[in-house]
């Protein structure tokens, strides 16, 4: 029952309960992993990192791999792509020879392999290695074609197209990610997909698309607020500030406010990354 509850918090449509989620050492490894996913989405990076550090040493290679890729995503969120790449590589190596029972949300060998490959694709893309990013993204698509891999593959595909200077080609994978996330009903994936889709629309260049992009991104920000997805609120409001100059300061203030609240609950590695990251604005006044 607890695993079902945590899975719906991580991958479904549940509003967080008033009592904070925890990841006690006494819990079963998959429960701790799901709790860490929820904690990361809420921007509680230190609590998530504590659980994930133990899970990376799990005897279960799937749990160890997923723990490493989850931690990598937290590093990548603030621009720590070098640190994330090491973790994603660790995750991929952990799966050598591994087998597992299928899991509907991809918490199995195929899903973990796709997570690691897509993480490596995103890491390489941010480091300017576009060809490697394309190759890794294609390998991920071959590894798993279920909902979560499809959504995350859409994000990376859109980012690859944008980095290549082909914004029109970013629309299809971004739209596919958003549609797939809605079919699953995963609020967290819907918010991230809508942010990616909004950026793709805005970059495509047509005035009406830019107006639609603002609606998509502001709705994503409101959904993130509803579900307490602080790791995504600051991103959505930062994008909204770029799309809506007339209200930019309001959005920038909220972005700074949320991000620095998140950093108060961050582990030391995230804090070091944040200090050097161009993504991190000045503290709110």
Image (spheres, grey):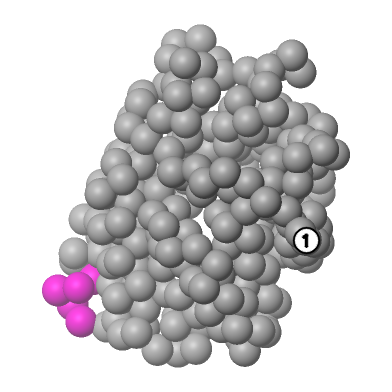
Residue at position x 53%, y 38% from top?
A: 41
257, 231: nearer the viewer: 231
167, 111: nearer the viewer: 111
Residue 277 in sight: no
Residue 59, x across and y down, in percent: 82, 38
| In this rendering, position of residue 24 left or right of residue 125 | right
Residue at position x 75%, y 46% from top?
A: 61
Please name the residue that numbered disc 1 is placed on: 96
Tell me if residue 207 is in the magenta stretch. Answer: yes
Residue 99, x across and y down, in percent: 67, 51
Q: On screen, 3 above or below 195? A: above
Which quadrant: the C terminus? top right
Quadrant assignment, res 246: bottom left
Q: On screen, 145 above or below 5? A: below
Secondary structure under badge 1? Answer: loop
Quadrant assignment, res 8: top left
Q: Which residues are magenta?
A: 206-210
Residue 70, x across and y down, in percent: 65, 46
Instruction: Rate crowding at label 1 as few (under 14), some (14 to 19) or many (20 or more) other CA atoms within 10 Å.
Output: few
Total labels drawn: 1
Tell me if residue 13 is in the magenta stretch. Answer: no
Residue at position x 51%, y 17% from top?
A: 2
């Amino acid at each position: 029952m607890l695993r079902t509850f945590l899975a719906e918090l991580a991958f479904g449509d549940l509003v967080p309960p008033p009592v904070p989620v925890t990841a006690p050492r006494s819990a079963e490894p998959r429960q701790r992993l799901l709790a860490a996913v929820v904690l990361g989405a809420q921007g509680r990076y230190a609590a998530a990192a504590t659980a994930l550090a133990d899970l990376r040493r799990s005897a279960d290679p799937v749990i160890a791999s997923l723990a490493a890729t989850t931690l990598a995503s937290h590093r990548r969120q603030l621009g720590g792509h070098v640190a994330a790449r090491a973790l994603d590589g660790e995750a991929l190596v952990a799966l050598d020879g591994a087998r597992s029972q299928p899991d509907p949300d991809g918490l199995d060998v195929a899903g973990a392999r796709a997570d690691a490959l897509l993480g490596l694709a995103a890491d390489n893309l941010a480091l300017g290695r576009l060809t490697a990013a394309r190759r890794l993204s294609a390998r991920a698509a071959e590894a798993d074609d279920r909902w979560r891999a499809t959504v995350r593959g859409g994000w990376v595909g859109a980012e690859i197209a944008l980095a290549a200077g082909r914004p029109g080609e970013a629309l299809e994978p971004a739209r596919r990610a958003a549609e797939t996330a809605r079919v699953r009903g995963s609020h967290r994936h819907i918010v991230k997909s809508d942010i990616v889709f909004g950026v793709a629309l805005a970059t495509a260049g047509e005035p009406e698309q830019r107006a639609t992009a603002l609606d998509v991104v502001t709705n994503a920000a409101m959904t993130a607020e509803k579900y307490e997805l602080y790791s995504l609120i600051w991103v959505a409001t930062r994008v909204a500030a770029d799309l809506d100059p007339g209200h930019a300061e309001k959005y920038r203030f909220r972005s700074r406010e949320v991000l620095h609240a998140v950093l108060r609950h961050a582990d030391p590695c995230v804090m070091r990354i944040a200090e050097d990251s161009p993504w991190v604005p000045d503290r709110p006044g």
